[in-house]
């Protein structure tokens, strides 16, 4: 359980009442929770999953130590029929599932993870090679963190984008957005649109509608 707020006296009161009703241990300031590491400074908070990435790379058992600059090559359009089917897709599914949770603190992998997760039912050798690229990227960027400054304003800044007809199998577009509260990135998503957009303008409007719903 995480108890947070801006009134330290009331937090102490809540913990005392909980201690009266339940057997509990106070672990002190938040540092690690469900694979997410939190470190605080006088300027703000840092959130990361460095240990989670280390464990993920160990489970993946990569055969080399190389790194790459980007999680996915530019203009890649993967299809279900690319490559040969994997004999056992369990390992692929396990790694993709781990990446989905990692995207909680790593918005830079949101797009490739969304693409790779579309093939978990029948992954191929090509899909697996692109999955390995994401892992090599994470190895080189393992120390990246999200920063939430104490002095941040409460003004929302929102950005959306769309890739028109980017899926070669069904011609549907992808929507993507990110939301900042002051200087803090607080929400992001990449999602395939539910209908085929007949123009890039329509695809952009659908992305804006998804963002507007999130902000509302």
Image (cartoon, rainbow, N blue to C red):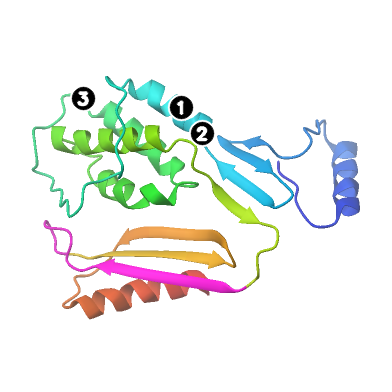
> Which of the labelled discs sits on residue 54, or is there none?
1
Q: Quadrant of the N terminus?
A: top right
- Residue count near mark 1 (Cα–Cα under 10 Å), binned few <14, some 14–19, many ≥20: some
Residue 48 on image: x %, y %:
54, 41
Name which quarter of the figure residue 149 lies in.
bottom right
Return the mark for residue 14.
none
Q: Which residue is mark 2?
A: 50
What residue did someone put label 3 on?
Answer: 88
Depth check: 140 or 181 in front? 140
Taking the spot 71% from the left edge, 46% from the top edge, the residue there is 41
Residue 178 in the figure: left or right of residue 24: left
Q: Which residues are magenta?
A: 155-171
Contact, mark 1 vs mark 2 (Cβ under 8 Å): yes
- At x 65%, y 69%, the residue is 153
In the image, which is nearer the foreground, mark 3 or mark 1? Answer: 1
Classify mark 3: helix, strand or loop.
loop
Alpha carbon separation for disc pair 1 and 2? 6 Å
Q: Regarding mark 2 in the picture, which secondary structure is present there?
A: helix
Which comes before the other along the chain, label 2 or label 3? 2
Mark 2 crowd level (few <14, some 14–19, many ≥20, 10 Å Cα): many
Q: Are marks 3 and 1 in contact (CB under 8 Å)?
A: no
Q: Is tag 3's residue or tag 1's residue first in the polypeptide sequence?
A: 1
């Amino acid at each position: 359980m995480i108890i947070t707020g801006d009134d330290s006296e009331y937090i102490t009161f809540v913990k005392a009442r909980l201690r009266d009703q339940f057997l509990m241990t106070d672990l002190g300031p938040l540092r690690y929770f469900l694979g997410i590491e939190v470190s605080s400074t006088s300027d703000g908070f840092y959130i990361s999953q460095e240990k989670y990435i280390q464990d993920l790379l160990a489970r993946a058992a990569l055969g080399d130590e190389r790194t790459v600059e980007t999680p996915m090559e530019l203009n890649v359009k993967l299809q279900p029929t690319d490559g040969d089917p994997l004999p056992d897709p369990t390992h692929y599914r396990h790694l993709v599932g781990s990446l989905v949770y990692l995207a909680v603190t790593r918005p830079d992998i949101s797009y490739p993870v969304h693409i790779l997760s579309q093939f978990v039912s029948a992954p191929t050798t090509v899909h697996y090679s692109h999955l390995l690229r994401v892992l090599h990227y994470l190895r080189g960027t393992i120390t990246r963190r999200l920063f939430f400054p104490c002095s941040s304003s409460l003004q929302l800044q929102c950005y959306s984008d769309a890739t028109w007809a980017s899926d070669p199998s069904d011609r549907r577009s992808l929507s993507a957005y990110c939301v900042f509260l002051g200087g803090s990135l607080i929400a992001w998503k990449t999602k395939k649109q539910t209908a085929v957009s007949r123009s890039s303008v329509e695809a952009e409007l659908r992305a804006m509608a998804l963002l507007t719903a999130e902000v509302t």
